[in-house]
Image: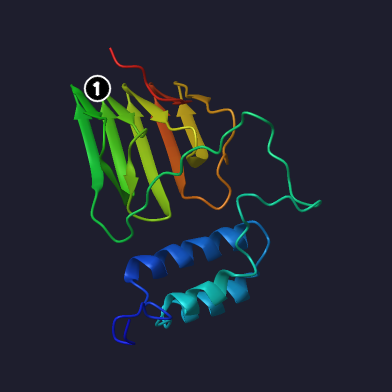
Amino acid sequence: MTDAESFPLSLRASDAERERTADLLRDAMASGRLTVEELEDRTRLVFEAKTRTDLERLIGDVLVPSDDDHPVAARQPPGLAQPERTHVLRGAEGTHRVLSILGGAKRTGRWRLAASCSVINVLGGSELDLSDVELSEDRVELKVISVLGGAEITLPPGLNVEVSETAILGGNEVDIATEQPDPGGPVVHLRLVSILGGTEVRRGRKPSR
């Protein structure tokens, strides 16, 4: 085999591989293996990297192998699988408004949620199933305002959420077990405002009818 026919010693990195490496570095920072300053420095180098070898050098000391048996490694209880991470497509457009007035709205299946989305229910209701949602950013805000109406929100098992709520002559029901099931993963901030109405939030795929 000639030199021209041999496999390149260091294959050029693709944009997708750079994005994946940056995600791994963010996960490492979230787990405490990198400082914020180190994350910023390495992320800059990621997008300057030319080859896969360059990328490997940036994550070699923070990427934990799947068969890690080091004595200080955290042990996962038997039978407990890591929840699937909600997909993020940064910069993409998505649903930024859902309006229900004297009627109803429904978002289920595979759909994309914009970085900021307002759901307004007036004498009506909305059903938002995030089980297969795709996020436009690592952190998005979903504001749900219900006046003489309500909303029902279903979250997948692995989606991190933050909840802030206000209820006036109404009420919200939030049953999500844990807010951060996926440390370092994307976050949806739910802002619930209910006036003579309410919003129900629960975790777990909604059963089909």
Q: Position of residue 189 (x, y in %)?
A: 46, 44
Helix, strand or loop at mark 1: loop
Quarter of the image for the N terminus: give it. bottom left
The residue lying at 61 percent from left, 76 percent from top is: 37
Determine the image quadrant of residue 120. Answer: top left
Report the colour scheme. Answer: rainbow
How packed mark 1 is, by other alpha carbons closer than 10 Å (few <14, some 14-19, many 20 or more), is: many
Relative to 91, does residue 156 appear above or below in the rendering? above
Relative to 121, does residue 186 appear above or below in the rendering? below
The residue lying at 50 percent from left, 41 percent from top is: 161
Q: Nearer the viewer, residue 61 or 140?
A: 61
Total labels drawn: 1
* Image-based side of 186 in relation to 125, left or right: right
Q: Nearer the viewer, residue 99 or 39?
A: 39
Q: Position of residue 15 (x, y in %)?
A: 33, 70
Q: Nearer the viewer, residue 69 or 196?
A: 69
Q: Tag 1: residue type?
A: Gly
Q: Position of residue 52 (x, y in %)?
A: 44, 74
Q: Position of residue 39 (x, y in %)?
A: 57, 72
The residue lying at 55 percent from left, 53 percent from top is: 184
Q: Nearer the viewer, residue 60 or 133?
A: 60
* Image-based side of 187 in relation to 38, left or right: left
Relative to 74, does residue 199 appear above or below in the rendering? above
Residue situated furthest front in the rendering: 1
Residue situated furthest top in the rendering: 209
* Image-based side of 13 in relation to 83, left or right: left
Relative to 153, does residue 110 appear above or below in the rendering? below
Determine the image quadrant of residue 36. Answer: bottom right
Residue situated furthest right in the rendering: 71
Residue identified by numbered label 1: 124
The residue lying at 38 percent from left, 77 percent from top is: 11
Quarter of the image for the C terminus: give it. top left
